[in-house]
Image: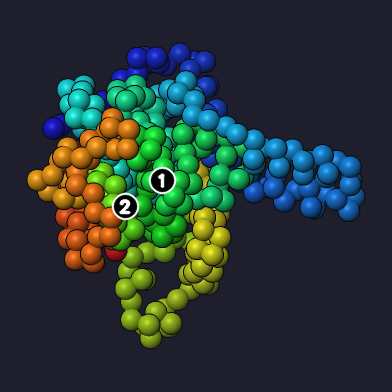
Amino acid sequence: ASLIRAKSAMFPSPHTKSQRIASWSLAILVSVSFYLGPFLLFLPFALYAFYPILATHMFLLNVFLAFYPVGDWQQFRSLFQLWYELFDLRTNMDKKTCKNIVKENSLSILAMHPHGIIPLHALLWGGFCTQMMPEFYGVGASTSIALRLPVLRQILRFMGVVSTQKKALINSMQVEDKGLLILPGGVAEIFLSHRRRTVSNVGNVRDVRQGNLQSIKAKRYGLMKLSLQTGAAITPAYVFGATDLFDQLAPVTGDKRREDASIHEHSITFLDRISEVMESFSRRMKGGITLFWGKFYLPIPYTPKLTLCLGDPIYPVPGTEGSESNINGKKRTCKKIANPSEEEVVELMERYTKAIHSLFEQYKDEAGYGNDELEIL
């Protein structure tokens, strides 16, 4: 299918002045929350020696924000339709395709790449899915640490996000009959993300993009095993422009990961060292911790054109589509394999990585990334 421009029923284009203000305010709020959450968490400890009463009150407020139950809020998800115009969203999903997905009524895992530095595109998907096929929308997955940070937690929970712990995911999928949105690249893809370089004033064209290597971390055995155990089809998704939303201090390139150790030791820079330390610390904390910025060196996103492309579902056990159902019988699944073998996991992973690569190649020209190449790590 060719790409089409997403159109919001709630906020038709062109936006009014108040809608543009609301759109930018929402983008800044979400971006700032990734700094604000950790700041609010540590502020009481910094203030305690000077203002113990204030620090105590702030600490109690943080505990309240970190643990008070917050649920999915569909109206909040709909607000992200405001970003259609901000990011000039295009997609390969027309109304007919969306209706067919809903009609199929299959349990699904939407696996989205790349993660990006700050995954604003995942929230944009929430707005799009709520508009076009609300029955398909299920839960998102995020690290436990992100779900305890003040403000950020509220945003994520309003979007229906749960912990990436396997028990929570299986409960949401098999018991609550909800599909799953996950960004499998995780911490690794955060540090692989970097904005693309541009060349200005080439002929009569300004801002001509150079070829770029886009690296993603798609070889995820745990995701394949989850699909086989739940019988959920994996729907690959790629968002062109997702890595152009922000800059970060020290991204790691795919080339550096493949370099010979002796060569790497001689060519490594100070920023590379910082990046390695931050990535290592992020893995230990099980959450991406990096220094990022956008416009004016502030947490204000750049506004690249975003292109959201979904591929065909990949069934974990081909030929068994819809043969089984979930616990309450609502969602149809493939045959479930409680203890999949290594061969079954590897075979599914090979089909998944091939599908991601094909999806990238199919739409990269139309999305404006014709000179780019995809590297799957």
Element under label 1? helix
The reply to whether callout 2 and callout 1 are in contact (CB within 8 Å) is yes
- In the rendering, which numbered label is found on residue 332? none
Question: Closer to the N terminus: mark 2 or mark 1?
Answer: 1
> Tag 2: Cα neighbours inside 10 Å, few (<14), some, or many (≥20)?
many
> Tag 1: Cα neighbours inside 10 Å, few (<14), some, or many (≥20)?
many
Q: Which residue is mark 1?
A: 169
Name the spot of residue 271 as percent of width and height, x first.
Answer: 51, 67
For the residue marked with disc 1, what is the amino acid? Leu
At 17% from the left and 37% from the top, the residue drawn is 322
- In the rendering, which numbered label is found on residue 226? 2
Element under label 2? helix
For the residue marked with disc 2, what is the amino acid? Leu
Q: Nearer the viewer, residue 365 or 50?
A: 50
Specify the quadrant of the image occupied by residue 194.
bottom left
The correct choice, above or below, for 164 with respect to 252 in the image is: above
Q: Nearer the viewer, residue 124 or 345?
A: 345
Q: Quadrant of the C terminus?
A: bottom left
The correct choice, above or below, for 295 with respect to 228 in the image is: above
- CA distance for labels 2 and 1: 9 Å
